[in-house]
Image (cartoon, helix red, strand yellow):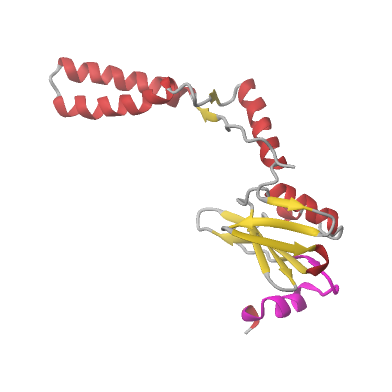
Amino acid sequence: MSNERHQLANYKSRVKHIFLPLICWLLVVACYWTDFTSGLIFFGLCALVLTYPLLNLKQKSIFTGTEGHKAETRKDFNFIYNDLGNFTYSTSGFDALLNSQNIHIYWKDIRAIFGYKADLFTTDLICMDIHSAEKVLRLTEETAGWYQFNSKMAGQFPSIDPKWCIDIASPAFETTLTLLYEKDGMELSQAITVYYPQQTK
């Protein structure tokens, strides 16, 4: 089952959405009456850029902090949470179209699953490595269908803690490599030597 796409709301603050364009247009008028040509060009361009979103009826804008904002953020989260992305699931495994490649993995072939964070300097990216008999599939929280994939994995492998993403979130900027599942019951230290031998050299 795939979810019908909808346009996510564009959230705006009142200051940025209304008052900044108004201020720019006032400065345009002031520059016009004082023959300040360079200021007229600069503030004119700023006013046009800031005014365009007000005239773009195809873009849904909602002010932050309002009831409408709260309702739309819930709707957006529910859409993202229920989105299957490019994954399809069956009782025997799953198929995925990732990076223009068709991937099929049987549940029974999955040997280990690791969760960890990748340091992107200004933020962390939560990742998951799925080690199967033939390949290693790497997914991130930015992968479409991420939430439903985690839900399906937890359903197939009950030993996976549904809150593992929260548990590894701190401390920030540390990998926090976590063994979510290992077919033979290995501990983390042993599993690292088997599945990430390059890190133990």
Residue 197 included in the magenta stretch of the image = yes
- Left or right of 102: which side holds 156? right
Residue 32's quadrant in the figure? top left
State whether residue 109 is above or below residue 125: below
Q: Position of residue 156 (x, y in %)?
A: 84, 57
Q: Quadrant of residue 62?
A: top right
- Quadrant showing the N terminus: top right
- Pick whichever, 158 or 24, lies toward us: 158
- The single residue placed furthest to the front in the displayed view is 102
Image coordinates of residue 105 in percent, x first then y, are 74, 64
Closest to the observer, 152 or 26 = 152
Q: Nearer the viewer, residue 167 or 143?
A: 143
Residue at (33% x, 20% y) in the render: 23
Query: How far from the left and from the top, in percent, is residue 49?
Result: 34, 28
Q: Is residue 18 visible?
A: yes
Q: Residue at x 81, y 59 (%)?
A: 160
Q: Left of 29 or right of it: where is 118? A: right
Indicate the quadrant containing the C terminus: top left, top right, bottom left or bottom right: bottom right
* Placement of 1 over or under 136, stated as above or below: above
Q: Image point 85% across, 60% down: which residue?
A: 159
Q: How many marks?
A: 0
Q: What residue span does the magenta drawing correspond to?
A: 179-198
